[in-house]
Amino acid sequence: MVAIILVNWKNYDDTKDCLHSLYQSIHASFSIIVVDNESQETPIAKLKESFPQITVLPQKTNLGFTGANNIGIKHGLTLGAEYIMLLNNDTTVPKNFIDPLLITLHSSPEIAAVQPKIMFHEYPYKIWNAGGIYYPLNASTRTIGYNKFDSEKYNKSKYVDWITGCCILIKAKIIPEVGLLNDQFFAYYEDVDWSLRIRKLGYHLAYDPSIPIYHKVSASSKNKDKTAEGFLSPFVHFLNMRNQIFLARLHTKGFHAINTHTFLLLKILSFSVYFLVRGRKEKLRISWKGFLEGYLTQL
């Protein structure tokens, strides 16, 4: 059985679209768990009415991507799921998209988890994520194929350094060994951390492009209208700055650590200059808050 976990945070329309696509794609051996951050009674009741098969786990507060998914993972494990899927609620999926992912997981005991090719929902001919590369020299990451036109070179299955939390299918038996998502991240870089922890145990992470899925992208992190601080929420800058430092502290040692922390200092200084020039005082303030918390937080 596959337990599919969606995290909703005040975004019921996208969750409904995702569920519609899932129920056109899956069958009886799947269980869908919706973890609802800052749950709102009326819309969640309507969602449950439209999709009576789903399990809804309402939360009084916003537990973030990590906390909510961890609740869903624990619930999936209690159901006896053989596989756990984390799936963003702002995605839509085509019919039978899970089948090639399951085939990939079955192909080797050394493969712990797999992701599909992920396209932009608004531009379905462009890639959002075709796997990830991790650079240990400065604890930075790159998304393969980001914003590139789809082509044959992205149609090859392969092992990758990290896979995106937008859509991860993982063998449930791996989770007690690797542990849950690190809840200190809240959101952003938690998938890189989880991926690196899985690989440190000797497992592989796979990218399977057979059936792409579609991502609406940043539905919860961008403002619809441009403000004095731009479109992107200042809180996202806080999380990205803090969490990259968390990642560096957890996964770099020796020369790599010296290089990484020098890089991060230069990064916050360059961000500061940019925000000062653009007059984005809140982003400047909160980026430094993230920088300091990244080093002062006990991990």
Image (spheres, grey):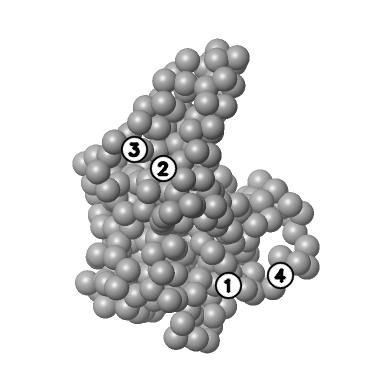
Q: Nearer the viewer, mark 4 or mark 1?
A: 1
SS at circle 2:
helix
Q: Amino acid at mark 3?
A: Tyr
The disc at residue 159 is: 1
Please give the residue where the numbered disc 4 appears in the rendered image. 155
Q: Are marks 2 and 3 in contact (CB under 8 Å)?
A: yes
Q: Amino acid at mark 2?
A: Ile
Neighbourhood count class around disc 3 (C-alpha, 10 Å): few under 14, some 14–19, many 20 upward: some
Where residue 238 appears, as percent x and y from the top left, is 42, 32
Rounded to the nearest angstrom, the CA distance separating label 4 from label 2 is: 33 Å
Location of the N terminus by quadrant is bottom left
Please give the residue where the numbered disc 3 appears in the rendered image. 295
Q: Are marks 1 and 3 in contact (CB under 8 Å)?
A: no
Where residue 210 appears, as percent x and y from the top left, is 64, 73
Q: Is residue 265 above or below residue 25?
A: above
Please give the residue where the numbered disc 2 appears in the rendered image. 245
Rounded to the nearest angstrom, the CA distance separating label 2 from label 3 is: 7 Å
